[in-house]
Amino acid sequence: MKKIILEIMIALTLQAAALHTFFANTFGVEKTTNKEISFSITRDTNYNQKVYDMATASVRVVIFKVSNHKQTILWTKAYGNMLLKNFPVNGQVMGETVTIRNISDRKEKLFVTYMVTYNNKGSVMELQNGTTVSKGVTQNKVEINI
């Protein structure tokens, strides 16, 4: 008799926990967080050789979120066409810190992408890269090497 009562209590407890989780996820107040993303643009190559005298690069950074299979651009910035040798070297940086407000870690995914466009006497090459801002992380650093 005790075994039957114990099994019934366990079954009811599991059902109550599942029901509570369902209602909490469906109707609960969603906590949002702010995400701070820092960008640093540096050059890690010596571009002082004559072949690079007229070579330029530009960088475009985009932060977007995906929610319910829909992309929304939250922030974008283009860093203008500069000679490769004018980009800061390691130890010096060009960049900024951006705060993205009210992100729901549970329902939204945050992405950072950047495209570097190189131009050397009309020959153009584009390189794209990016990263995901992990759930639970409030500060993220993106290093862009030219």
Image (cartoon, grey):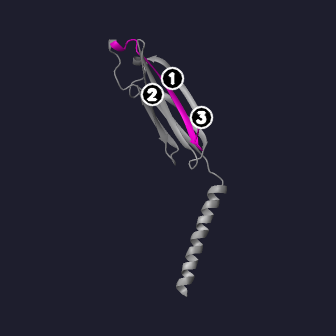
For the point 60% across and 62% down, the residue is: 21
Image coordinates of residue 122 in percent, x first then y, are 43, 12
Image coordinates of residue 35 in percent, x first then y, are 55, 41
Q: Residue under circle 2?
A: 41
Q: Say above or below: 40 vs 102.
A: above
**Callout 3: helix, strand or loop?**
strand
Image coordinates of residue 129 in percent, x first then y, are 44, 32
Q: Residue under circle 1?
A: 79
Camera-side residue of 2 and 112? 2
- Amino acid on which disc 1 is placed: Tyr
- Amino acid on which disc 2 is placed: Ile
Image coordinates of residue 85 in percent, x first then y, are 39, 17
Q: Say above or below: 118 vs 109.
A: above
**Callout 1: helix, strand or loop?**
strand
**Is 68 part of what is drawn in magenta?**
yes
Assess disc 3: are there few (<14), some (14-19) or many (≥20) residues with their C-alpha within 10 Å of its C-alpha: few
Looking at marks 2 and 1 on the same chain, the residue that comes earlier in the sequence is marked by 2
Q: CA distance from mark 2 to mark 1?
A: 10 Å
Looking at marks 3 and 1 on the same chain, the residue that comes earlier in the sequence is marked by 3
